[in-house]
Image (cartoon, grey):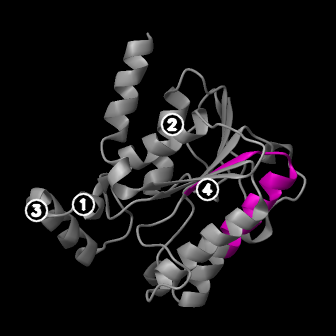
């Protein structure tokens, strides 16, 4: 299976690439990034500028796209810059993949994503979901994780770190969908969705909420062992 992974240098993206490269049924991973990744026999790593994506690259055609592309308003510097990255770049890449014949798009969104949300961040995520639906992929999978735990961020996020600490400390008292979810579980759920897509005559949209992502890596690992 040939997979195209967007946002491969982020927390979830790094996990996606690692898990995809280790999967026996994945023959090639295409990961366009701004900076070079560590080489791997199954990895094709085009160096790109997301503001000027190549229109006719043959690698846009894949069995599925897994998108973990995104930033924060703080890192982007403004709401406009954030929207350009999290919305415009994602939809531009999705449009090119769709035009090239890719049938399945798996998108890492956020818990509470809604174009009418009070939070600008969640508004943008919700608009991306709406625009991905409008592109008409044969299958669209949307995952909506809560706070992400695990991995090492390049930027410091004190408020998020405190929230994750409290989530782990009082985990049993917090509703499951609001608990922090490990980036490895998010990646595992996305990869499982990509590898097990079912295509129907009409557009198919599946939404996985945060509570459904909990323990995804453990579940997929156990299923793999049972098959062996």
Q: Which is more N-terminal, label 4 or label 1?
A: 4
| Picture residue at 65% right of the left edge, 37% below the top | 198
Q: Tell me the magenta residue range.
A: 88-107
Count of numbered tags: 4
For disc 2, the neighbor class at 10 Å (few under 14, some 14 to 19, many from 20) is some
Residue at the extreme right: 56
* Residue on which the image places disc 4: 35
Residue that mark 2 sits on? 192
Mark 3–mark 1 Cα distance, whole angstroms, equals 9 Å
Which image quadrant is residue 146 in? bottom left
11 drawn magenta: no
The residue located at (57%, 62%) in the rendering is 69
Q: CA distance from mark 4 to mark 3?
A: 42 Å
Residue 74: % across, % down: 44, 83
Q: Nearer the viewer, mark 3 or mark 1?
A: 3
Q: Secondary structure at mark 2?
A: helix
Label 1, residues with CA under 10 Å away: few <14, some 14-19, many ≥20: many
For the residues carrying marks 4 and 3, which lies nearer the camera in this image?
A: 3
Q: Quadrant of residue 185?
A: top left
């Amino acid at each position: 299976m040939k997979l195209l992974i967007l946002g491969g240098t982020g927390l979830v993206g790094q996990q996606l690439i690692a898990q995809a490269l280790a999967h026996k049924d994945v023959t090639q991973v295409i990961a366009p990034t701004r900076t070079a990744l560590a080489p791997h026999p199954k990895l094709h790593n085009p160096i790109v500028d997301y503001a000027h994506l190549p229109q006719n690259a043959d690698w846009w055609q894949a069995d599925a796209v897994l998108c973990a592309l995104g930033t924060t308003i703080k890192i982007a510097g403004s709401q406009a810059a954030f929207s350009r990255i999290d919305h415009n770049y994602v939809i531009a890449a999705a449009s090119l993949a769709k035009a090239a014949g890719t049938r399945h798009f798996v998108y890492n969104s956020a818990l509470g994503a809604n174009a009418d949300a009070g939070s600008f961040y969640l508004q943008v995520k919700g608009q991306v979901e709406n625009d991905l639906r409008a592109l008409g992929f044969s299958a669209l999978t949307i995952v909506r994780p809560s706070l992400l735990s695990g991995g090492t961020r390049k930027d410091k996020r004190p408020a998020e770190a405190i929230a994750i600490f409290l989530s782990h400390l009082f985990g049993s008292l917090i509703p499951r969908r609001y608990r922090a979810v490990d980036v490895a579980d998010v990646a595992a759920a996305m990869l499982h969705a990509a590898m097990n897509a079912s295509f129907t005559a009409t557009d198919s949209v599946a939404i996985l909420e945060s509570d459904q992502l909990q323990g995804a890596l453990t579940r997929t690992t156990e299923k793999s062992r049972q098959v062996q």
